[in-house]
Amino acid sequence: MNCQKVKSLLIGFLNGELEENIRKRVREHLDLCADCSREKELLSTSWQLMLDHSVPRVSENFTADLMKKIRLGQSEHIKVTFNLPFFRGLFGVRALSGALGFVLAGVFVFFMFWKSPSNNQELAQKIQPDYQISESIANDEEIIKNLDILEDIELLENLSLLTEMQAIENFEEETT
Amino acid sequence: MDYFDEDAQLMLRFKDGEESCFEQLVERHKQRVFNLAYRFFSDYQQAEDISQQVFIKLYYAKHTYTPKAKFTTWLYAICRNTCLKILRVKTPKMLSIDYSKQLEEKDVLPQIADTKIPRPDTVILDKERQEIIKAALDSLPENQKMAVILNRYEELSYEEIAGIMGCSQKAVKSLVHRARLNLKEKLAVFYEKT
Ligand SMILES: [Zn+2]
């Protein structure tokens, strides 16, 4: 076993993840090779050193603050949701297309009105889609407001069923 | 497989309308959630904000709860998800913090309880050590960093981490291995100084 091969197996060796015969060969190499032996020590001590990362205590009024936020309603949560680029983007696109649809519908209705101003019943029918559009914009906003919560609910429900696609996406930059 | 540990019991009771069970869950896990967020961002206020968001999400997700996965796996998954979302919108300016100042301002949880009064030179060395460790952790790509936090500090198995991160155990193992190689390089500075 050469040094390169041994070095690639060192973490597995330290974690006790190697098969017995491979572990034995690595051990034999380490007994003879000072370079690989030092590498093993560095891997071991650096991992040990990481444990010294201390963390401050969470503030004493954490729970009280949290319960206050919850009781005050979802305003705090929604504010955070809207700060996320995905939702900003989504909302931006929807609001834009919604507004465009609204304007086009308005123009359409205006021309209908201009052509036959006397037919009020027909006009009311033409206006109806216009009203529906504005209502759908309001509904969209509600949906978007709840998306963040829904996304996490979905995550929680499907925790054990996360697809390989997501894994690929998550680790694409890592593996390339 | 269903989990009926104390957390699961509390969550099920909360689902049935016992609000006090939610508060108990927060009390039991707030430091755990905070630790993860703090190690991920090295920012006290941000870590606390994220922790609050995590529990708010948990609060509103109660109706969907079934004890199919371990409660903590569920909790870590929300926490990881929240951290990554925040990371996407974080500006470089927000990332910079005066770490040593933070350590002075806040109580620090030592890994091992130590009642002795530290000598000033030990404090300096400890602070320096903290900064080096923090910088090493911060230098890792986000997935490696998350895997290290879950594996090294939260002491979770590759299997549990895979469940939280939505990837295979093999991928988690690979992430941790690569992170260890990176950390070894970054922490070489520390060995040179000591
Ligand atoms: Zn060698």
Image (cartoon, rainbow, N blue to C red):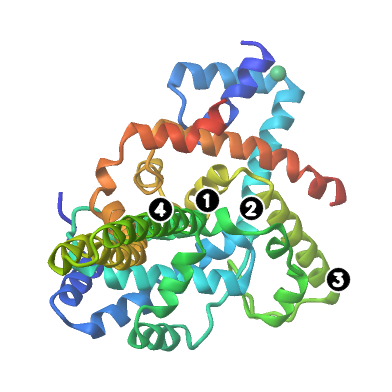
Task: Kindly identify which chain the residue marked by label 4 belongs to.
Answer: A
Chain to which mark 1 belongs? B
Circle 4 residue: A97
Which residue is nearer to you in this view: A48 or A57? Answer: A57
Whether residue B113 is visible: no
Q: Nearer the viewer, mark 4 or mark 2?
A: 4
**Residue A51 appears anywhere in the view:** yes
A141 or B135: nearer the viewer: A141
Residues at circles 4 and 1 in contact by the CB criterion of under 8 Å: no
Residue A174 coordinates in the image, percent (x, y)? 56, 33
Question: Which chain is mark 2 on?
Answer: A
Q: Residue at x 70, y 28 (%)?
A: A37
Of callouts 1 and 3, the N-terminal one: 3
Q: Is mark 4 within 8 Å of ligand 1?
A: no
Give the spatial CA distance, label 2 vs label 1: 8 Å
For mark 4, does the 10 Å Cα neighbourhood hold few (<14), some (14 to 19), or many (20 or more) residues?
few
Q: Element at badge 4?
A: helix
Task: Give the quadrant of ligand 1.
Answer: top right
Is disc 1 placed on a helix, strand or loop? helix
